[in-house]
Amino acid sequence: MAERPLRADALRNSRRIVEVATAAFAEDGAGTSFEEIARRAGVGSGTLYRRFPTRAALFEAVYAEQVEQLLAPVDGAANARAALDSWLRCFVEFIIGKRAFAEEMAHDTELVVDARRRIYATATPLLEAAQRAGTVRHEVTADDILRMLSGIGLAEYPHSGQLDRVVEICLRGLNP
């Protein structure tokens, strides 16, 4: 039996819960209580539990929303290399957002596997365009870059600005 579409108010509540949960997990960690998320979202706990009956369901909804934001088209870049660099910086921000609940989510779910496939499908043409333009080394693969930047995004940095500096060093390392 097909699931009925949500009413407009239920859809608004679900979106608000995911938005608030995203911020709460980033600020306070994966242990943020459902009650706190419901309070911040301006909904009752029952509303939250109806839409997201488990912590895993809420994590997956947050993850899916962040993947959609990451995969949004890159606009306004002056050239292929600028588009690649801009998207890779967004990818690092995406990875940083995963720190809070990476241990809470199963890494081999259909959602995660599909997201990984879609991320690579977005990164590869951006990389190839920059390589055709002669602005990125030809031996570098999307897998090389995404794994490197994933490690950078998951690391802890002792002082402000170091993350940006490390990302910039890595991006310069792509130059031919």
Image (spheres, rainbow, N blue to C red):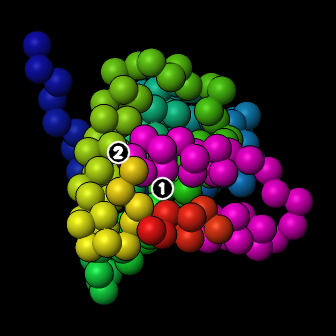
Q: Amino acid at mark 2?
A: Ile
Is disc 2 placed on a helix, strand or loop? helix
Q: Is residue 129 left or right of residue 145?
A: left
Q: Nearer the viewer, residue 60 or 131?
A: 131
Q: Which mark is residue 52?
A: none
Q: Nearer the viewer, residue 8 or 128?
A: 128
Image coords of residue 51 (percent x, y): 40, 32
Q: Quadrant of residue 111?
A: top left
Residue at mark 1: 91
- Earlier in the chain: of badge 1 and badge 2, it is 1
| Mark 2, other Cα within 10 Å: few <14 / some 14–19 / many ≥20 | some
Q: Quadrant of residue 163?
A: bottom right
Image coords of residue 148 (percent x, y): 58, 47
Q: Can you see residue 14?
A: no
Mark 1–mark 2 contact, CB under 8 Å? yes
The answer to whether residue 163 is magenta is yes
Q: Is residue 166 left or right of residue 124?
A: right
Image coords of residue 41 (percent x, y): 54, 53
Is disc 1 placed on a helix, strand or loop? helix
| Mark 1, other Cα within 10 Å: few <14 / some 14–19 / many ≥20 | many
